[in-house]
Image: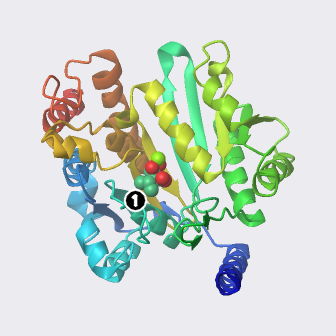
Amino acid sequence: MKEQIAQAVSHFEELLRQQLERVDQLEKVSASTDYSTLSPLVIGIIGGDGIGPLLVQETRRLLDLLLQDDLNSGRVLIREIEGLTLERRLEWGLAVPPDTLDQIKDCHVLLKGPTETPRGGTLESANVALRRELDLYANVRPVRLPEKGIDWTFFRENTEGEYVLGSSGIEIPGKLAVDFKVTTDTGTRRIARAALGFARKRGKTRLAIVTKANIMKKTDGNFSRLVHEEAGSYPEIEVDDWYIDIMAANLLNPAIRNKFQVFVLPNLYGDILTDEAAQIQGGVGTAGSANLGDRYAMFEAIHGTAPRLIEEGLGAYCNPSSLFRAAAMMLDHVGKTEAAKRLDQALEICLEIEKRLIVTGDRSGACCTGFTDYVLQTLQRK
Ligand code: IPM
Ligand code: MG
């Protein structure tokens, strides 16, 4: 037993050392990319696993139309990135094979299909690794349901919390297991500023901090305190604290849910709450997600690879709306605001107004390609 404890302690010491090194890196201020100066702007597209390649292929059809002029003139380049498949990751024993990571880092922004992560074992999620490698610290997830007065934007911290050491826990087999949750001051302050800055820019007046600071006193306690500190520079924004359990209930409570505007929350709570919020909007197939850093940005669906659909032979019936919305967020992020608006409007027509074709995830509804045709036709109508 003594030996097992000693091993665990030295493992912990190494983790602490690595995390303090990460803090040193974080404290070095980095400049933000100015997309308007890039020529060509390079968009990398990554298929992923399961339904991913189909979703990405269909989204590309929309991009090809929306960016037609920029693609023809060479101002924008769409580059397909190969090799981020589960087979290759298992072969390398790495979340992202190094040659693939090099290709990814050569792009400015990325549009990515979902990737699969085996449960247990030590292979880290490709999402988590990419968010870390590209320092994509703000996971921005909008959820709107206009007829119910819902207009929420979640700012999920994307590089810390339970995720940062989620594959580096300690186990004494047959006895116990310990995982770690890490938050840093710099990491918390920057997600707070991202959420507050967004609120100011969009004229939002309320920010909800969501934690479980009554239980996780160090990590969540600091998270809340530091967000309040940063909010001192945004006096026009009213900041409230909520616990994750009651917030999960509040999102379902019609009496108060439409009062919430912007949320800021640690990684795992953000993961869970945004699936719930997306379900309220119409399902996880309907919500887009932006992973933003100072240098890179990656846009993806909020859902996974849909292994059940694939197993049942229903892969072709997957809903591409989540990745379409992510593509609109990407266009907006790189300054292609007109194209972003066109796509958002077309999606609103197809998903909320006309609903001529509905993807239901089974043979009773539209298939992924059929729905994409519908969006393309809608785009071409105007
Ligand atoms: C998400 C996903 C990922 C996460 C998985 C695929 C690692 O659920 O983007 O919300 O947990 O962050
Ligand atoms: Mg999730």
Q: Residues within 10 Å of mark 1 (few under 14, many from 20)?
A: few
Report which quarter residue 176 is drawn in: bottom right
Name the residue nearer the viewer: 142 or 244.
Answer: 244
Can residue 335 be seen here?
A: no
| Residue 156 percent across, percent down from the top left | 60, 48
Task: List the residue tagged with mark 1.
Answer: 119
Can residue 277 be seen here?
A: yes
Name which residue lies at 78% across and 64% down: 185
- The image shows a total of numbered marks equal to 1
As drawn, is 192 to the left or to the right of 34? right
Q: What SS does tag 1 mark?
A: loop
Name which residue lies at 32% across and 41% down: 324
As drawn, is 330 to the left or to the right of 295? left
Name which residue lies at 44% across and 68% down: 124
Q: What quarter of the picture does the N terminus occupy?
A: bottom right
| Residue 343 percent across, percent down from the top left | 33, 36
Relative height, residue 44 to residue 328 (above, below): below
Relative height, residue 380 to residue 267 (above, below): above
Relative height, residue 56 to residue 18 (above, below): above
User: Could you tell me the amino acid type at mark 1?
Assistant: Arg
Report which quarter residue 102 is drawn in: bottom left
